[in-house]
Image (spheres, rainbow, N blue to C red):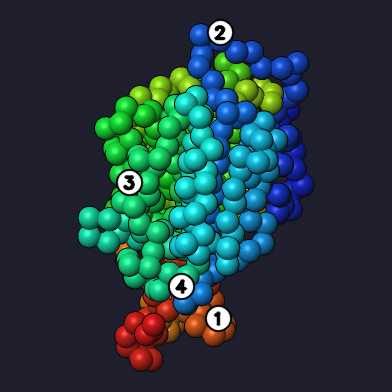
Amino acid sequence: MAQRLVFNPSRSRLALPLGLLTALLVTTTTGAFSSPEAKEWEPGKTHVLIVSVLEWKHGLSPFPKRNRKDEELRDLLIKRGTPKKNVTMLLGVQATLPKIRQALTDTLGKASKDSTLIIYYQGHGWADGDDYCFANYDVRSRDKDTAWSINELATTVAAEFKGERAFFWADCCFSGGLEVVVDRLASRKVASFSLTSASTANDSTRNWTFTQSLLDALSGAPLVDTNGDGLITLGELRTEVREAMHHMEGQKHGFKVNSVEDTLVLAKTSGRLTKNPQAKYQLGSYVRAKGSYGRIVGIEGNEYSVQFYNYTDKLVKQYAEVDLAPSTRKPGMRGRHRPRPAGMKPDCTVKWHGDWYDAKVLKTEKDRWYIHYVDDDDTWDEWVGKDRIRLKKIGAAAKE
């Protein structure tokens, strides 16, 4: 008789709120256990600055605002015990360069010698010579002189942070540039790490996959607990981010650490996974399902529940074992490489991960285009701005 392992969602396509799968993936336990030797992150002694921008004053490509994950991250940090007064969040029009600088100084000034600092950014990022830049709301289209410079961030934090350790997270292109801050703090013997959606040399997708990985880990999702000890550590968070960005998004993540052990405990799990040694694909493994890449989140007999990302939603579909294959995706592979539909003729090319791909414009608004990649399925359809599209009828990149 087939053993039910996790859950059996409807056989139809589901759009689940991100985070709901945590409850579906586990069987309830009486509580996680911890090792007395394990050093733990202390939310009550943490100071947080969150800067997140989804649209810009001077024409950078916007992101949809639905079900945004930055606010969810703030709420989770507070729920975990970070005092509300220790959390500063700048969203959209609030995130001008002067306000970011002031908020950073204020946050650093509150930290005591045993404090932890968390800085999180979401938006656009780019490399500029020997510096990296994050796009504040009022940046002038990738103009370094009006952007939030990572070199500047490193200088400010190194000079003004008096605490014990610092975590730097970013969900944007070239976000791996935060390693500059880690290196600067190392010279001051301050423990820190940067964990980012991209490396110092690659773009990042528009999906909230990286931020969702943070949420899953900090909320105690059992899939993140790879050794099953009831604890989620920095090492396991890094693995979760690396594998999610690799298989779900086809890109490299970024990680740099100084004097923070992989065994640092970030959360206790909310339950335990039930494993089935006889299953060909185990819970949490990544697979290719009829041309798309996803993750096994449920098993019942020879039928698997496979999770996909769609911007801020986790989509779960059912597949027979014969329809699955192990993921062989490599960082830098963009799409599903499906055959081009008959009659689908491209009318533009769109930049993704530094390469240009044939696409078709489906609709247009002021300074942005909703496009379909002609060699991929419609889960990759997205809005792009002037900086990422070349319209074939004019034969050149759209002008700023």
Tell which tag, 2 or 3, sits nearer the viewer.
3
Determine the CA span between mark 2 and mark 3. 36 Å
Vertical placement of 260 versus 75: above or below? above
In the displayed structure image, the side of residue 186 where residue 349 appears, left or right: right
Tell which tag, 1 or 2, sits nearer the viewer.
2
Query: To which residue does mark 4 refer?
Result: 60
The mark that comes first in sequence, 2 or 4, is 2
Looking at the rendering, in which quadrant would you find the C terminus?
A: bottom left
Tell which tag, 1 or 4, sits nearer the viewer.
4
Q: For the residue labelled by badge 2, is the local secondary structure a helix, a strand or a loop?
A: loop
The mark that comes first in sequence, 1 or 4, is 4
Query: To which residue does mark 2 refer?
Result: 36
The mark that comes first in sequence, 1 or 2, is 2
* Residue 362, numbered circle: 1
Mark 2 surroundings within 10 Å by alpha-carbon count, few (fewer than 14), some (14 through 19), many (20 or more) = few
Give, as a three-letter code, the residue at label 2: Pro
Determine the CA span between mark 4 and mark 3. 27 Å
Q: Position of residue 299 (x, y in %)?
A: 66, 33
Vertical placement of 195 versus 137: above or below? above
150 or 300, nearer to the observer:
150
The mark that comes first in sequence, 3 or 1, is 3
Determine the CA span between mark 1 and mark 4. 20 Å
Query: To which residue does mark 3 refer?
Result: 155
